[in-house]
Image (tube, rainbow, N blue to C red):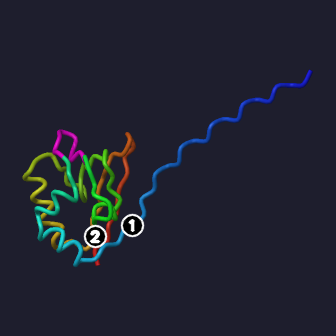
Amino acid sequence: AAAATPPVPAAAPPVPTADTATVSRADVDATLANFAKLTTDLQGSISANGVVIERVAPGTLFARIGLRAGDVITAVDGARIRSLDDAASLYAKVSTAKAIAAQIVRNGTSMTLHVAIQ
């Protein structure tokens, strides 16, 4: 009788990596200048854990930096986002930032999205 072939173990899921996304200052400024469009490009809600992303419109600045529906933004540059005041502070900071690092949780895994603004 032939020996049974042992099952091949399933490959471990890939570990998320975060490359730096580069966006233009003009794109950031245009996004920040049109709050109505911003709220259609990125929809979410503030929770005790951070900003829960409900929808990211395809092709938008937010999609290009790597945000996805289901992500939870827990902090940006180490500053936690737990209220509208926190979000307003972030909005003001991004208007002059040259780079940001968004700490997110995606499918239960913590990772950082790095964004260079040029």
Element type at marker 1? strand
* Marking on residue 99: 2
**Quadrant of image for the N terminus:** top right
Q: Quadrant of residue 63?
A: bottom left
* Marking on residue 113: none
Is 94 above or below relative to 10? below
Looking at this view, is 32 or 60 the one in front? 60
Q: Is residue 33 left or right of residue 23?
A: left
Element type at marker 2? strand
Question: Residue 33: within the magenta?
Answer: no
The furthest residue to the top: 1
Q: Which residues are magenta?
A: 45-53
Disc 2 packing (10 Å; few <14; some 14–19; many ≥20): some
Looking at this view, is 23 or 98 the one in front? 23
Q: Amino acid at mark 2?
A: Ala
Q: x, y percentage for residue 93?
A: 15, 66
Residues under numbered marks 1 and 2 in contact, where contact means CB atoms less than 8 Å apart: yes
Q: Is residue 42 left or right of residue 113?
A: left
Q: x, y percentage for residue 38?
A: 17, 62
Residue shown at the point (53%, 44%) measured from the top left: 13
Q: Amino acid at mark 1?
A: Thr
Among the two numbered marks 1 and 2 on one chain, the one whose residue lies closer to the N terminus? 1
**Quadrant of image for the C terminus:** bottom left
Marks 1 and 2, how far apart at CA: 9 Å
Dot 1 corresponds to which residue? Answer: 20
Residue shown at the point (12%, 68%) measured from the top left: 34
How many numbered dots are placed on residues in this image? 2
Q: x, y percentage for residue 114?
A: 34, 63
Q: Quadrant of residue 23?
A: bottom left
Residue shown at the point (24%, 74%) measured from the top left: 27
Q: x, y percentage for residue 40?
A: 18, 57
